[in-house]
C-alpha cells in the first residue's frame, strides 16, 4: 500500500492510528516529536505524512513549513485545534487535508485514501471515461458525449470521486470526507442535494438513473449505462 510517517506526541493516539493503518496494509513509521518526525519524513521518502500540531519540541505549523521546504509529500494534519483561522492557515501553509480530534479511525482512513488517490492521479493529462461520460482532472473539464457539462466545483469533485471508483458503492460519509473535507462529518442532506443537481445535468433522475445508482442504506455508485 503506502509508506506513512506518523508524527503524534500522544502515545495512545499514536498507537491506535499506527495499528489501524498497519492493519490496512500500510507501512507506518512513527515519532513523538517534531524533529524526529522531520528526520523520518526526509529519510524514509514516505508517500504520506500524518502529523499533529501540538508537538512538544516544535509547533506543528512550523514543522509543516520545514517539511514543505524539502518535500512535496502529502500531509494530513490531525489536531484538537478546530478554529477556522487555524484550519485556513494550516492549509495555506501546505497541508493537504485537516482532521479535528476526536475523529474516528475510519474517517482518517478515508482521508488517507483520498489524498493518496489524488497523488496517484495527479498527472494533469489523466482522463476518466465511463460510457459517454469523460472527465479531465487537470483542466477540470467534463463532457457527456460532445456536450460540455457546466459543473460547480463541488459537483465536479463529486463526479471525479465517483468516476475514480466506478462500480464501487461510496457512502455519503466517505463523500463528505473526500469532497467536502468536512472535519465534523457534515450532513447527508448536502450530498443528496449535490447528487440531485448532478443527476439533472447528466439528464437522469434518482428513480430513472443512467450513471448514478443509489444503493439504499449504503451509498451511491457510478456505473456505465452500457452494462
Image (spheres, rainbow, N blue to C red):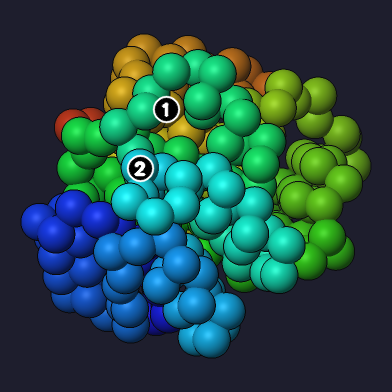
Which one is earlier in the sequence, the residue at label 2 or at label 1?
Answer: 2
Q: Residue at x 82, y 52 (%)?
A: 138
Could you say which disc has been placed on residue 54 in the image?
2
Work out which quarter of the rendered image holds the N terminus and state it: bottom left
Q: Position of residue 142 (x, y in %)?
A: 79, 41
Q: Residues within 10 Å of mark 2 (few under 14, many from 20)?
A: some
Report the residue that reaches farthest toward the bottom.
43
Q: Which mark is residue 182?
A: 1
Q: Is residue 202 above or below residue 12?
A: above
Res. 123 visible in picture: yes
Left or right: 207 as drawn, with respect to 42: left
| Closer to the camera in the image, 204 or 117 | 117
**For mark 1, does the 10 Å Cα neighbourhood hold few (<14), some (14 to 19), or many (20 or more) residues?**
some
Spot occupied by residue 121 in the image (x, y as percentages of width and height): 67, 65
Q: Would you say 48 lies left or right of 125 here?
A: left
| Quarter of the rendering containing residue 150 | top right
- Percent x, y for residue 40? 46, 79
Q: Are marks 2 and 1 in contact (CB under 8 Å)?
A: no
Residue 72 in the image: above or below residue 198: below
Viewer-closest of 178 and 168 = 178
Q: Mark 2 falls on what kind of element? A: loop
Please name the residue shown 61% across and 30% down the image: 89
Q: CA distance from mark 2 to mark 1?
A: 21 Å
Task: Say which of 151 and 102 sits in front.
Answer: 102
Task: Report helix, strand or loop for mark 1.
Answer: loop
Left-right relation of 53 to 160: left
Residue 154, image x, y percentages: 62, 27
The structure residue drawn at horizontal position 31% and vertical position 24%, both measured from the top left corner, is 184
Q: Which label sits on residue 147?
A: none
Picture layout, residue 41 above or below residue 213: below
Residue 122 seen by the camera: no
Amino acid at each position: 500500500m503506502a509508506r506513512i510517517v506518523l508524527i503524534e506526541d500522544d502515545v495512545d493516539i499514536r498507537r491506535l492510528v499506527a495499528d489501524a493503518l498497519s492493519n490496512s496494509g500500510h507501512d507506518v513509521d512513527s515519532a513523538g516529536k517534531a524533529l524526529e518526525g522531520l528526520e523520518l519524513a526526509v529519510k524514509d521518502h514516505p508517500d504520506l505524512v500524518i502529523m499533529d500540531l501540538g508537538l512538544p519540541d516544535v509547533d506543528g505549523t512550523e514543522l509543516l513549513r520545514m517539511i514543505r521546504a524539502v518535500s512535496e509529500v502529502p500531509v494530513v494534519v490531525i489536531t484538537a485545534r478546530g478554529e477556522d483561522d487555524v484550519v485556513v492557515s494550516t492549509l495555506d501553509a501546505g497541508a493537504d487535508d485537516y482532521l479535528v480530534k476526536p475523529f474516528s479511525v475510519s474517517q482518517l482512513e478515508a482521508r488517507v485514501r483520498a489524498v493518496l488517490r489524488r497523488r496517484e492521479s495527479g498527472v494533469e493529462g489523466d482522463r476518466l471515461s465511463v460510457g459517454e461520460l469523460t472527465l479531465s482532472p487537470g483542466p477540470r473539464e467534463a463532457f457527456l458525449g460532445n456536450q460540455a457539462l457546466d459543473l460547480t466545483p463541488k459537483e465536479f469533485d463529486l463526479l471525479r470521486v465517483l468516476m475514480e471508483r466506478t462500480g464501487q458503492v461510496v457512502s455519503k460519509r466517505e463523500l463528505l470526507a473526500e469532497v467536502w473535507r468536512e472535519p465534523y462529518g457534515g450532513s447527508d442532506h448536502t450530498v443528496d442535494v449535490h447528487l440531485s443537481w448532478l443527476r439533472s445535468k447528466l439528464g437522469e433522475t434518482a428513480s430513472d438513473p443512467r450513471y448514478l445508482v443509489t444503493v439504499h442504506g449504503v451509498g451511491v455508485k457510478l456505473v456505465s449505462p452500457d452494462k
